[in-house]
Amino acid sequence: MVLNCDSMGGPVVKAAEMALEMENVNHVLPYVSEEDEEEVKYAFEKAARVRELNEDAAELADYWFFETVLRIHLKAKNESFNGIKPSKTNLSPIMRKAKMAMDEEDLTDLVEYLSASMENEIRKRFMEVLNNKDYDLNEVDDAREYVNSVIEFVYYVDHIQNSILFDNKK
């Protein structure tokens, strides 16, 4: 999950909270497929009615609505729903940078971070290849180390390229 979608602090639950608070289901509909829209609207209406009963009922209705929307959201992504996770306060560095880029509407730091990270990893793997290439043919373990470093290097850059191409096919 890119932005901890399955947590209380994730964008899906936040959108569901906003929908209930603003009494407008449209806040959460972008997180579900068109074919699942009616189920979400039905759940929204039920939750809205139950919320009016009392504070305990409202808390229960809210949580049920969050679970419903999250389950439907994950189903469309072919991911299983295993309950709502607690909010993740310690996002990874890349998630913090991505969030900051969106908040500030500026990609500069994110692109620089990704570029530097990728370059460092490519250089590290490449140096392993160079450091291992002059092995003694009679030292099979050294030869294996070289072959493994070549495979790691080639697979890594191939994985990067495939990730880029995969994203461009969407």
Image (spheres, grey):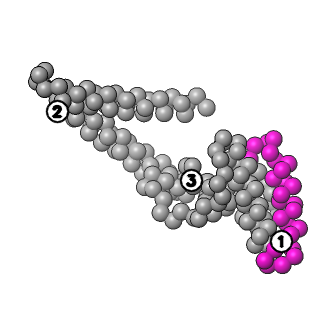
Mark 1, residue position:
51
Q: Is residue 104 left or right of residue 130?
A: right
Left or right: 37 in relation to 96: right
Q: Farthest residue in the bottom direction?
A: 55
Q: Position of residue 77 (x, y in %)?
A: 66, 42
Q: Choose between 28 and 8: the one closer to the eye.
A: 8
Magenta portion: prevailing SS class: helix
Q: Residue at x 87, y 55 (%)?
A: 42
Which of discs 3 and 2 lies nearer the camera? The answer is: 2
Q: Nearer the viewer, residue 135 or 48?
A: 135
Residue nearest the observer in this picture, 103 or 62: 62
Tag 3 residue: 3
Name the element at disc 2.
Answer: helix
Residue range in magenta is 32-57
Marked residue nearer the N-terminal end (1 or 3) = 3
In this figure, which residue is indicated by the disc labeled 2? 131
Q: Are marks 3 and 2 in contact (CB under 8 Å)?
A: no
Describe the element under mark 3 as helix, strand or loop: loop
Query: Marks 1/3: CA distance?
Result: 28 Å
Q: Earlier in the sequence, mark 3 or mark 2?
A: 3
Question: Between marks 3 and 2, how big is the CA–CA gap?
Answer: 38 Å
